[in-house]
Image (cartoon, coloured by chain):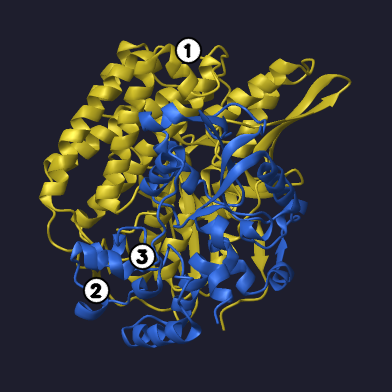
Amino acid sequence: MKLPLTLVEGEGSITVIERSGRVERVLYEISEAPRYFEYIVQGKSPEVVVDLVSRICGFCGVSHLFLAVKAFEKRLGVEVDEEVDEFREVLHLAERVKSHVLHVFYMNLPEITGTRSLVELAERNPGILRRAVAVYKLSRRLMSTLGGRSHNVVNMRIGGVYYPPSREEVEKLRSELREALSALLDLADTVLSFKHSLEVSVIKHQLCLYSSGDYPHHGERVVLDDAVHDVEFFYGHLARAATREYSTALHYRINGVESYITGPVARFNRYYTRLHRDVRSLLEAYGWRPPLGVLESFTARFAEIYDSLLRIQEYLENYKYTERARAETTQRSTRDHTCFYAVEAPRGILYHKYVLDESGRVRECRIITPTAQNLAAMEDIATQLTRGEPVSESTFKIAKSIAVAFDPCISCSVHAVPIRVVKSTSS
Amino acid sequence: MLRILVVKLTSCSGCINELIYALTHSDIRDKYRVAYFPEIEDSDEVTSADVAFVEGSITTSQQEDFLKAVRSRVEFLVALGTCAISGGVQSLVVKESAESAERAIYSETQVPASAAGRPRPIESAVRVDFAIPGCPVSGEAVVSFLRKYSLGGLPLVLYESVCSECKRQGVACVLVAKRVPCLGPITLRGCGALCPVRGRGCYGCYGLKFFDVTQKSVRALARRLRELGLREEDFETLLLAYGYRVCSELK
């Protein structure tokens, strides 16, 4: 039996495999067509590639762009000022806010409340739509002021940014941000009072970027449960992928066996204490504390929206960045052709790895998206909750709740099929 | 109330997010009702409607059939963004020829059956009544379309390049004054000169100016940009990525 998935990004469906009327396994069939990005970027210059990969996803384009830029900077030996990096981090946090707002209010709340859409939900509670729109619009304003537009931002490059916004532009943002923060706090009472009707506490393994200071953001080490690994080692040796007949997306498992989750719930559960103090006191006032289950992802997202906005606010209050970024380039040994990096995209760890050829063009590329990593866990959790039960409407309902809570980014997950290129396209 | 369908084919969801933005305007919500928009509407039934917005290019025969079914149910169909209009960045796979790409690529396990296919603009399968260019489209362009359509009109199509937007905003030409490689002269307007305003050269994401650009003029610009340091193959990649169809049909 099969049912199309709604309230998620991209095209997919739920398939339930049954044996004599009982659930054997739940599968998420991803039917979206792949776009072969790993192949497309071959033979292209890094400067062109960073903008191309931002097209992988309309939700998390900045994550792809920022990460590719960081990876190439490492390879080319480009040192950027801390100030420049901070600016780009803030732009990336704005994307986290935008993606989470869309997910929590436009996709997850309708699912939890059993309404068709946010607009229908707003017929009962008009304040929700008004306030959610206020936060959403602010996130777009942040992205367009800092990045040029609300996605596929143009204001980031290898070595820095193109244009630091003027103090006047930033001044305008500050007052809008204050209004959005107050709208968000008004929403807290609604969002944080929800309890999902289904209790799910089964999470076997959790993965996020390792961070020694702040809430995890970008870097080169991951932490799986309690073990810290080098990101290249993790994706090169521990996480193994397989395609499934029913899916154009990859499914990653640890050693090809155990599933794991990455994303807001994993980040929240491990690094809760790194969230802003105000965020924690708000959550605790509503009785929320780690660990969260996967269906409580809306709480983790709400916390991250609030935390990100507070961090962006702090940045904007102290904004004095006026100098155009000037990158220092040091000559790197040309034997080191490989570069990689990872970022905590809205839905979890995103990893890129590039191998360049002698002329500095991309020869090989590997991209691992959060959704490709979460798919196995989604299926395992949905199966575990329903296995052996008679196949019914509720099987699909549970499977759908799991899918919507994970917020799969289907366009992202099918950027490629697992490919190995035998023939290089660059001459 | 006008009813709208929002359809996604092979794409990134970036352009349909601009529709979510457009629908945050209360005057637009007063005039339009969403009949199909699976991303934000819990309904999978394609009903008849007034306007369909289509994002993405066609890469499978199922998509083509679906698109034709959508076309038969609506009065007016809008191609939303570069993928729908021209194929999108995924068209770069065709440059090396889709067949050779498939031959050159093999999977560790297997390529799913639905994976094959070369991206095509939607006009290859259905009639398109209006096109909003951009990778991604501008949210304001979508808002403008929805407002005007509800009054029985359409936005005016300006046959101009990005240069016109620089001139109107009083932005000094980055190509001439700063010697920054810029694709503005041959790129469709509509972004508000996003990049030149920030001192960056246009990289052509609204697509090649289809109505008057010729191979000769493209070559002339390519020569100048090469002198300024833009590699020829990078130039070609940009043209194909954001304007595959127009670029491959240049005379």
Local crowd at mark 1 within 10 Å, few (<14), some, or many (≥20)?
few
Name chain A's colour: yellow
Mark 2, secondary structure of its residue? helix
Q: Marks 2/3: CA distance?
A: 29 Å
| Residue displayed at 39% across by 17% down | A191
Q: Amino acid at mark 1?
A: Lys
1 or 2: mark nearer the eye: 2
Q: Which residue is mark 3?
A: A74
Give the answer, above or below, for where A69 lies relative to B144: below
Mark 1, secondary structure of its residue? loop
Lower sequence index among marks 1 and 3:
3
1 or 3: mark nearer the eye: 1
| Residue displayed at 58% across by 54% down | A415
Q: Amino acid at mark 2?
A: Val
Residue A201 rendering spot, x and y as whole percentages = 55, 19
Q: Amino acid at mark 3?
A: Lys
Give the answer, above or below, for where A213 lies relative to B230: above
Local crowd at mark 3 within 10 Å, few (<14), some, or many (≥20)?
some
Give the answer, above or below, for where A120 lies relative to B92: above
Q: Which residue is mark 2?
A: B174
Picture quarter containing residue B26?
top left
Judging from the image, mark 1 belongs to the subunit labelled A
Q: Marks 1/3: CA distance?
A: 44 Å
